[in-house]
Image (cartoon, rainbow, N blue to C red):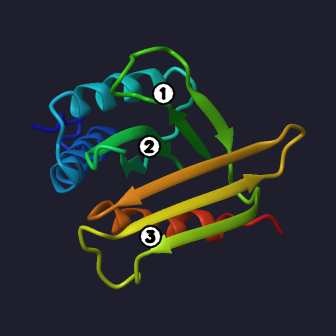
């Protein structure tokens, strides 16, 4: 149950965290809910708090179909209002390697390759997104989705990537 402040009102930060955790559970359920995924997401959310007070507003897990035709989850992404953070191979190894970038109004390039019609996904759908950020070093990101995860990636394109193109 959400905590209350001294005035009897719900603590907004606790409500946001509870909503995010519920959203994460729903998202993981929709894309297949591997047993370790929720534990690893929680671990990295705690790591993220060491860098910024900004709340994670959205998560995304890149996935693909491997050579054995098995569905595999790959990289975990967090998005706040200003920052994005990527944890590569977050289910395979729990290392403390995290890419952390400011992306607000810094996206300069977007490439979309797809077998997906943006209206509905099916088991054969896939979506690949490559983007670049303005920076003193070459910074880019890759997001991949298959099946039911395509709708989530499509929303990230519309709601996060495109609105943050550099002026």
The earlier-in-sequence mark between 3 and 1 is 1
The earlier-in-sequence mark between 3 and 2 is 2
Q: Position of residue 24 (x, y in %)?
A: 25, 46
Relative to residue 14, is residue 35 drawn left or right?
left
Residue at left offset 27%, top offset 38% = 14
SS category of the residue bearing label 1: helix
Is the residue 19 above or below the residue 95 in the image? Answer: below
Distance Cα–Cα, label 2 vs label 1: 9 Å
Distance Cα–Cα, label 3 vs label 2: 18 Å
| Displayed quadrant of residue 152 | bottom left
Front position among marks 3 and 2: 3
Is the residue 150 above or below the residue 134 in the image? Answer: below
Q: Are marks 2 and 1 in contact (CB under 8 Å)?
A: yes
Q: Position of residue 96 (x, y in %)?
A: 50, 15
- The answer to whether residue 162 is seen in the rendering is yes
**Mark 1, other Cα within 10 Å: few <14 / some 14–19 / many ≥20:** some
Residue at left offset 67%, top offset 64% = 164
The disc at residue 48 is 1
**Mark 2, other Cα within 10 Å: few <14 / some 14–19 / many ≥20:** many
Relative to residue 154, is residue 51 drawn left or right?
right
The earlier-in-sequence mark between 2 and 1 is 1
Residue most extreme to the front: 68
Relative to residue 55, is residue 81 drawn left or right?
right
Residue tagged 3: 154
Residue tagged 2: 56
């Amino acid at each position: 149950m959400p905590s209350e402040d001294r005035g009897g009102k719900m603590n907004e930060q606790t409500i946001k965290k509870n909503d995010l955790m519920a959203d994460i559970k729903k998202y993981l359920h929709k894309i297949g809910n591997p047993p370790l995924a929720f534990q690893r997401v929680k671990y990295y959310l705690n790591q993220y708090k060491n860098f910024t007070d900004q709340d994670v507003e959205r998560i995304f897990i890149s996935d693909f179909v491997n050579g054995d035709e098995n569905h595999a989850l790959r990289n975990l992404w967090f998005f706040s209002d200003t920052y994005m953070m990527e944890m590569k191979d977050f289910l395979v190894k729990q290392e403390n390697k995290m890419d952390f970038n400011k992306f607000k109004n810094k996206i300069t390039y977007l490439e979309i390759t797809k077998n997906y019609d943006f209206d509905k996904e099916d088991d054969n759908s896939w979506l690949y997104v490559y983007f670049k950020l303005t920076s003193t070093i070459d910074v880019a990101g890759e997001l991949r989705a298959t099946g039911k995860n395509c709708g989530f990636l499509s929303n990230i394109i519309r709601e996060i990537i495109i609105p943050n193109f550099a002026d």
